[in-house]
Amino acid sequence: MEGFVFPNEQHVTWTVMIVLYPYITGLVAGAFIVSSLHHVFGLKQLAPIARFSLVSAFVFLLFAPLPLLNHLGRPDRALNILITPNFRSAMSGFGFIYALYAIILVLEIWFDFRADIVRRYEAASGLARRVYRVVLLGATYRDERTDRLDKKVVKTLAGVGIPVALILHGYVGFLFGSIKANPWWSTPLMFIIFIFSAIVSGIAVLTFLYLFVTWNRRLTRNQATVDTLARFLWGFMMVAVVLELMEVLSLAYEQTEEWSVLRELITGRLWVSYVVLQLLTCSLGPFLLLSAVALLKLPLRISNLLVFLSSVLLLTQVLLMRWNVVIGGQILSKSYRGFTSYLPGLFEREGLVVAAVIVIVPFLLLREFDKRFPFFPVPAREEPS
Amino acid sequence: MSTTSPGQAGPPTRYVRRVFLLVGVALVAAALLQRAARPATWGELGNYRTAGLTAILATEPVHLGKEGCARCHAEIFGLHEKDFHFDVECEDCHTPGREHVRFHDRFPTGGDPALAALASMPKEYTREGCLFCHRRLGARPRAFAQIEPAEHYAFLGVNDPQTRCIACHSPHEPIFLLAEVKRARIHPVIHECIHCHDTKPEGDYTQVDSHPAMFVCSDCHEGIVEDFESRKHSFMRCTACHLYHPENEDSGRILVNGNRRFCLLCHEDAPFRTGAKQPLVDSKAHLEMIADALELDAAELAADPRACLRCHLDKIHGDVVRK
């Protein structure tokens, strides 16, 4: 406690679980945007990871509500948000946006994988064959016409999915940005910042996984894919970080009454997590690394290593950004004259171990999916960037 | 390209329609399910069940109020009512008591141990539990008892930072008042420098130009305050012993705490105290030694709540008070 803190502010209510929630939904939205860059905008360089990004989006989507459920005192009442929604609260939108997005993703994955499932159906027998038939909803046939049709449907769904993905994550930013009592959150820029940081985290996680998997399995990686991911990562991270800085700069320039306490927050409680780690280490660092990759002619190994490092740093940057927003806004007293503090425990219900499990399990699930429907079955031929 | 089920190979768009039809049916089913799952009277008056109001009114409260506890715990209730926690409900620390009372009403002599365990109420008082109300916060009224743990422990020479509050204070009579706080004398409101200033300024308010006039102890008790300033305890505020309980903007109740257990809050020898800050005594052995040396009735001295003041009043006040 420091300064003038109200008694009901001693306890930080939104814990590390609420830090994870926007982080995971950001990964969902970002991964989906990457898949759409191929499906909708025809970026052929991203074809090798289009399916991978689509399934990643779906797997992360499955786990997005988990931190919220773990945070709720009565998770058994979670569905009430769908049964008796109160539309005067922005939170009531979550269930519907989430459900709509889940439907689009499931449909897109179904159409994208349909031809593969038909092949499996053809090769299978007995119970497996019956299971495949059910999964295919009886549509066990395929030819060139159906393949073209599937692609067309995937393209349409991806097109519809882009605004829904942006709404899903923009909505999370809106939740924070619309809390006018909190000067650290209340800004119309918040949802735009959340959307761009989501895209950054999505591209970063796919870059990280693609480079890691191809390195780990000694697969020939498609260099054009890596280069394209690196360029997009570079571009979107610049926009995201500049937006974050512009938000703070506008507050500082306006010199409103909130700024006096926000300045103390930034230079005091959030100095390490925001200034040192988020901005100087995890934003400036990858910016310099990706600039070097984009502007200098580096050996391929070095270039890919820098891209890999950048993806790790940017994944950390977005996580830190979520932490600094969610926790920073709560350790600031509503009196504007004091600060409280928050440090999660290790083994408690909403502690760091549970948080780590929630982050790691989607990756394990991705691995399981990969075992059944390999994302990178045939080593791609290396292409010059 | 193969057609695995030639009989089914109709127009290729059929399965697409089928999938979207399925999604449509699922959405309609979900909408119907939502409507069916919605409580009957929900939305009539607002975003809640109208019937919920009646249901809530018919709910038996889980909190009983401290009078419910007094039925069986009269002795503790007496202590609690006398001391400064008199306006704190028992259930604030002990959690709701309905099941506890139900069980003991039903099984006055015991009952199933498993049920008894369920009906038992927590007694442990963690330091965080106490600090929830007593941690020093700028937003609390200054007259409210509040501490910064590290500073409080340093002041008292407590060397173990994990020492719990109940090592010295009893939750039921936190400062061992001799008289009931609710019956203490009405006293005009007391202003102290630290009610507005973070630390006590040197001098007094009369030395500051245009400082608002305020009422301080020495205004009326000049001789006593002057005498106190020359005593061992002069580093303490008058209200440390003459506790002031504000009741409104103009007045409160003031009382004198002369209980030896109050003195022992600082002076009792304990493993977590260094003894560097203040003299420490093993009170039991000390009283026995005094009774022996002065040929007093040991039992009577041990039972005297003001035993410390018999010999040590001069560390606080001189004859000016006795007179």
Image (cartoon, rainbow, N blue to C red):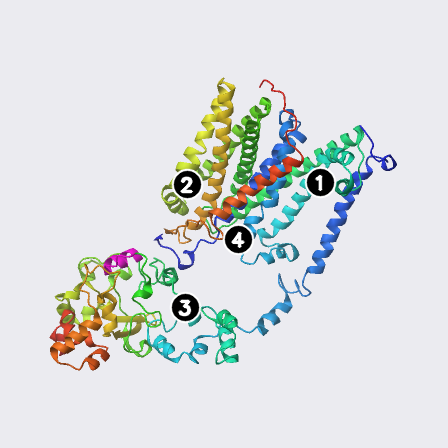
Q: Which of marks 3 and 1 is in front?
A: 3
Q: Residue B187 carries which label?
A: none
Residue at (68% x, 60% y) in the render: B38
Residue B151 belongs to magenta span: yes
Measured Cα–Cα span from mark 2 to mark 1: 40 Å
Q: Quadrant of residue A278?
A: top left
Vertical placement of A3 versus B229: above or below?
Answer: above
Residue positioned 54% across, 52% down in the render: A70
**Label 3 to label 2: alpha-carbon separation:** 39 Å
The answer to whether marks 4 and 1 sit on the same chain is yes
When the figure is inspected, residue B299 is found, relative to residue A186, above or below; the finding is below
Location of the C terminus of chain A by quadrant is top right
Give the magenta-colored segment's residue range.
B149-160
Q: Is mark 2 on a helix, strand or loop?
A: helix
Circle 3 residue? B123
Q: Which chain carries label 4?
A: A
**What whole-number distance in Å separates the C-alpha atoms at marks 3 and 1?**
56 Å
Q: Which amino acid does label 1 sit on?
A: Leu
- Within 10 Å of the Cα at label 2, are there few (<14), some (14-19), or many (20+) other Cα atoms? some
- Do the residues indicated by labels 2 and 1 lie within the same chain of the protein? yes
Among numbered discs 4 and 1, the one appearing first in the sequence? 4
- Residue under label 2, please give it: A273
